[in-house]
Image (tube, rainbow, N blue to C red):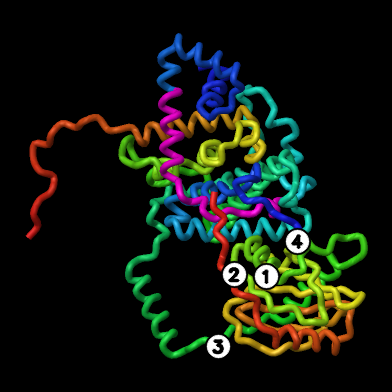
């Protein structure tokens, strides 16, 4: 009988893929709540599993193979998600829809939103590298490989993502007190 | 900031530097307060992002779902890209931009609420749904017998042949196979007890339209028999029926919300007899959905 070691003992497991998946798939336009994001992540992974039948890396594979498999798993998830987003846009008849467009929050002014909302507000092409490096703990080389981009592009996108998140979450300077209350009683 | 230094800053923040490189970068930061401030800001940002998205990893995915090395899509165009030195060039983004550049107005220019249905529309749909639910009670799901049979036959032909490892998880215990399938398929799988005439060889994942299915391989004397198990949307329990699928016979029945297809190199009558024994046998102890945490 094949004995699968506990998850914590296995290098390169996918325990953080769900966390990454839910964080990546949530946005303010197509997947507005946590439950929808979790369902979408499960569905994308069932798709991934279907494509992997009979070709998978076994649970008892060596460390290097498992780490490589982890990169490919994340890459596969990212590609399925991109495909899903494009299909959704086409189904909605938005032929010119830009999957990397900013959401309404993305256009929010600095200091108005929290960290999770700031990340969700990023365009997909900036959200992907930031989350795969920070949440999944990939090295830059691995992240570039999983996202199918060059290392230079990864660095460029990470810079943009971090600067944009910093701008969105920066506390607002103390505003001057208003001369008159901005709420009024309506009878 | 120059590209190499920027790459080092990101690498430092993301713990991608070797110890000696790290030391060298920290010396640079000691002489450049702006660089140190930026590193501290980005590190704090990393921690805040981890905290903001904490708690999503409770249910993990098994690593064995990963595609094999010789996968086809997307890889060929990126030879050596990951190891390249940062140079500022952008790779072709054919896949991502194929949809975006068609000359039509982008969704960015349209108000975010433009596609949301109006309150009146929502109320109308809700009322209609309520009326339909009131006057029409849907029958139990019709089991896709043909699809189950075809998937079972295809799995048997693919995996139960000479030179191919028939199972991914070798076990003679039904309960162990049930636990493994539940973990792999990320939803509860229930298996009937093994009839006395059969011996379980093990389990594997098999293709099925829309979602993967469980596939068990049994040995009956000197022959192999396969049992495909797929979750369905609330089918009523039915007795085994013989069905011709792709030139072979398959015994199909439903049980505990699942469709089952028994296939093998046996006569139809023999398959049906074994299927009846499966259908009459008690279930293995139900396995709770395993939570594979971090």
Give me the residue at 67% from left, 70% from top.
B175
The residue labelled by disc 1 is B175
Q: Secondary structure at mark 2?
A: loop
Sort mark 2 into few (<14), some (14-19) or many (20+) by Cα contacts within 10 Å: some
Give me the residue at 81% from left, 68% from top.
B201
Q: Is residue A106 visible?
A: no
Marks 3 and 2 in Cβ contact (< 8 Å): no
Mark pair 4, 1: CA separation: 12 Å
Q: Are marks 4 and 2 on the same chain?
A: yes
Report the chain holding disc 1: B
Mark pair 4, 3: CA separation: 37 Å
Query: Where's residue B137, x and y in %?
Result: 48, 88
Query: Where's residue B31, x and y in %?
Result: 45, 9
The residue labelled by disc 2 is B287
Residue depth check, mark 3 versus mark 2: number of the one nearer the observer: 2
Residue B169: mark in rendering: 4
Q: Secondary structure at mark 4?
A: strand
Marks 2 and 1 in Cβ contact (< 8 Å): yes
Q: Earlier in the sequence, mark 3 or mark 2?
A: 3
Q: Earlier in the sequence, mark 4 or mark 2?
A: 4
Residue numbers of the magenta segment? B39-66
Q: Are marks 3 and 1 on the same chain?
A: yes
The residue labelled by disc 3 is B139
Left or right side of B5 for B63: right
Give me the residue at 71% from left, 51% from top.
A59
Query: Where's residue A112, x and y in %?
Result: 31, 40
Marks 3 and 1 in Cβ contact (< 8 Å): no
Q: Nearer the viewer, residue B210 or B64?
A: B64
């Amino acid at each position: 009988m094949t004995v699968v070691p506990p998850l914590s003992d296995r290098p390169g497991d996918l325990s953080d893929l769900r966390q990454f998946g839910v964080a990546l798939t949530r946005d303010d336009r197509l997947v507005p709540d946590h439950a929808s994001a979790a369902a979408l992540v499960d569905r994308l992974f069932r798709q991934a599993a279907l494509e992997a039948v009979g070709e998978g890396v076994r649970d008892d594979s060596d460390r290097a193979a498992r780490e490589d498999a982890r990169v490919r798993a994340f890459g596969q998830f990212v590609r399925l998600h991109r495909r899903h987003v494009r299909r959704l846009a086409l189904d909605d008849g938005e032929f010119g829809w830009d999957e990397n467009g900013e959401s309404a929050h993305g256009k929010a002014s600095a200091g108005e939103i929290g960290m999770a909302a700031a990340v969700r507000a990023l365009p997909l092409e900036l959200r992907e590298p930031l989350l795969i490096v920070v949440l999944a703990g990939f090295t830059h080389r691995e992240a570039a490989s999983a996202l199918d981009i060059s290392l230079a592009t990864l660095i460029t996108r990470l810079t943009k993502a971090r600067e944009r998140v910093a701008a969105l979450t920066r506390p607002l300077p103390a505003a001057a007190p208003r001369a008159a209350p901005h709420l009024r009683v309506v009878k | 900031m120059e590209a190499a230094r920027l790459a080092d800053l990101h690498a430092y923040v993301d713990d991608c530097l070797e110890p000696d490189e790290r030391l060298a970068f920290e010396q640079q930061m000691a002489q450049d307060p702006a660089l140190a401030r930026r590193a501290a800001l980005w590190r704090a940002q990393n921690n805040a992002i981890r905290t903001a998205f904490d708690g999503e990893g409770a249910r993990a995915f098994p690593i064995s779902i990963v595609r094999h090395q010789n996968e086809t899509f997307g890889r060929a165009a990126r030879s050596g890209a990951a190891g390249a030195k940062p140079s500022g060039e952008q790779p072709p983004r054919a896949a991502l931009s194929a949809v975006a550049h068609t000359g039509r107005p982008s969704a960015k220019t349209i108000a975010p609420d433009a596609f949301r249905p109006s309150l009146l529309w929502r109320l109308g749909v809700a009322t209609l749904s309520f009326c339909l639910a009131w006057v029409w009670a849907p029958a139990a799901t019709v089991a896709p017998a043909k699809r189950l049979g075809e998937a079972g036959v295809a799995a048997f032909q693919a995996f139960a042949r000479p030179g191919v490892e028939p199972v991914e998880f070798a076990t003679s215990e039904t309960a162990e196979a049930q636990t493994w399938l539940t973990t792999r398929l990320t939803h509860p799988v229930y298996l009937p007890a093994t009839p006395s005439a059969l011996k379980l060889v093990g389990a594997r994942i098999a293709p099925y339209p829309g979602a993967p299915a469980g596939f068990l391989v049994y040995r009956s004397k000197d022959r192999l028999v396969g049992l495909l198990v797929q979750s369905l949307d609330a089918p009523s329990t039915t007795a085994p029926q013989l069905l011709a699928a792709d030139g072979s016979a398959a015994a199909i029945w439903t049980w505990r919300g699942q469709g089952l297809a028994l296939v093998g190199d046996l006569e139809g009558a023999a398959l049906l007899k074994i299927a009846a024994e499966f259908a009459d046998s008690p279930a293995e102890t139900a396995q709770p959905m395993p939570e594979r945490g971090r």
